[in-house]
Amino acid sequence: MAGITLEQAEAKLAQYMAAEEAVLTGQSYRLNTGATERELKRADLASIQQGIRLWEGRIARLSRASRGMRVGEVIPR
């Protein structure tokens, strides 16, 4: 995921969440991801939900990476 920041991932997730909301209310939704533009309709709900899971996973990984390595203390007995 080189080059993708946490903020960018959160923005993509927000786009997918908005698309899901629009489709669930019976509307179509235009999703512009920069390089491509697609119009999503009710038939694409599974695809939108898959995108939500993908971006949630990326956000989780980026969040863990930004916290850095945790160091614990071990006391031998």
Image (tube, grey):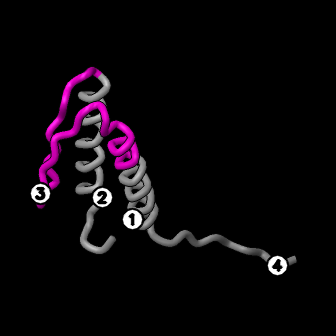
Q: Position of residue 9 (x, y in %)?
A: 29, 55
Secondary element type, mark 4: loop
C-alpha distance separating marks 1 and 3: 25 Å
Extreme front residue here?
Answer: 43
User: Label 2: which residue?
Assistant: 6
Which SS class for mark 3? Answer: loop
Q: First in sequence: mark 1 or mark 4?
A: 1
Total numbered circles: 4
Which amino acid does the dot numbered 2 rest on?
Answer: Leu
Q: Which residues are magenta?
A: 25-52
Is tag 4's residue or tag 3's residue first in the polypeptide sequence? 3
Percent x, y for residue 43?
31, 35
Which of the 4 image quadrants contains residue 73? bottom right
Compared to residue 13, the image places residue 60 above or below, namely below
Residue indicated by mark 3: 34
Q: Which residue is mark 1?
A: 66
Label disc, if present, on residue 76 of the rendered structure: 4
Q: Is residue 37 left or right of residue 60?
A: left
> Tag 1: Cα neighbours inside 10 Å, few (<14), some, or many (≥20)?
few
Which one is in front in this view, the residue at disc 1 or the one at disc 3? 3
Q: CA distance from mark 4 to mark 3?
A: 54 Å
In whole angstroms, how far apart are the C-alphas of marks 2 and 4?
38 Å
Furthest toward the top, the residue is 25
The quadrant of the image that shows the N terminus is: bottom left
Residue type of the residue flagged with mark 1:
Ser
Q: Quadrant of residue 5?
A: bottom left
Q: Amino acid at mark 3?
A: Gly
